Image: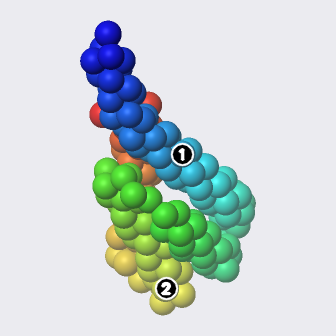
Amino acid sequence: MASARTTMVLLMLTALPLSACGMGKVAECNSFIEAANGAQEAMRKATSKVQASDNPADIESVAQAMEKAGKDITAIELKDDKLKAYQKDYKEMLDKGAKACRDMVGAAKSKNLGAMKKAQTDLGAIGPQETKIVGDINGYCSGGK
């Protein structure tokens, strides 16, 4: 009888670290998703100005919003390696978007149509890339991956 209790206690003790790891992932996922949602909202506000304006300063504000979002995303301390990889991917995507915005401003100022089209193409690639990264994060955090 004592050996059965000892076995049960050992099982419970070994299960504790596993459940703690699971809670760590959940907390990290929640922090990451919260920051990503905040980033998306800030970028949505910044891009709404651009849609109603041709002002290069408005495009610059989108670049700044993307850079701030990237800093906010990387400020989250993560231990989970998979989440760290998603964090890196998300930051790189935001950096590319900010660069494309600035390239667009430069092309508009210099009236370089070819550079303008390239910047627009680069910026257009950000949406699908973000959708994929967000889908991967949501899949991983919900236990699907």
Estimate the spatial distance between the alpha carbons at disc 2 and disc 1, rounded to whole Å.
41 Å
Q: Are marks 2 and 1 in contact (CB under 8 Å)?
A: no
Residue found at the very far top of the displayed protein: 1
Q: Against 139, is 89 above or below?
A: below
Kind of residue at disc 2: Gly
Q: Residue 63 placed where, x, y %?
A: 56, 73
Which residue shows up at 35% across the image and 76% down it? 114
- For residue 26, side relative to residue 11 (left or right): right
Which one is nearer the viewer's eye here, 73 or 119?
73
Query: How many marks overall?
Result: 2
Assess disc 1: are there few (<14), some (14-19) or many (≥20) residues with their C-alpha within 10 Å of its C-alpha. Answer: some
Kind of residue at disc 1: Ala
Q: Which residue is mark 2?
A: 106
Q: Quadrant of residue 64?
A: bottom right
Q: Residue 59 placed where, x, y %?
A: 60, 73
Which one is nearer the viewer's eye here, 16 or 35?
16
Q: Against 52, is 55 above or below?
A: below
Residue 31 appears in view: yes
Q: Quadrant of residue 55?
A: bottom right
Residue found at the very far bottom of the displayed protein: 110
- Can you tell which of label 2 and label 1 is closer to the viewer? 1
Which one is nearer the viewer's eye here, 33 or 40?
33
Please report whichever mark, 2 or 1, sits nearer to the chain's N-terminal start.
Answer: 1
Which residue shows up at 44% across the image and 76% down it? 99
Assess disc 2: are there few (<14), some (14-19) or many (≥20) residues with their C-alpha within 10 Å of its C-alpha. Answer: some
| Quadrant for the C terminus in the image | top left
Q: Which residue is mark 1?
A: 27
Q: Give the image's coloring scheme.
A: rainbow
The disc label shown at residue 76, or none: none
| Quadrant for the N terminus in the image | top left
Q: Secondary structure at mark 2?
A: helix
Residue 121 appears in view: no
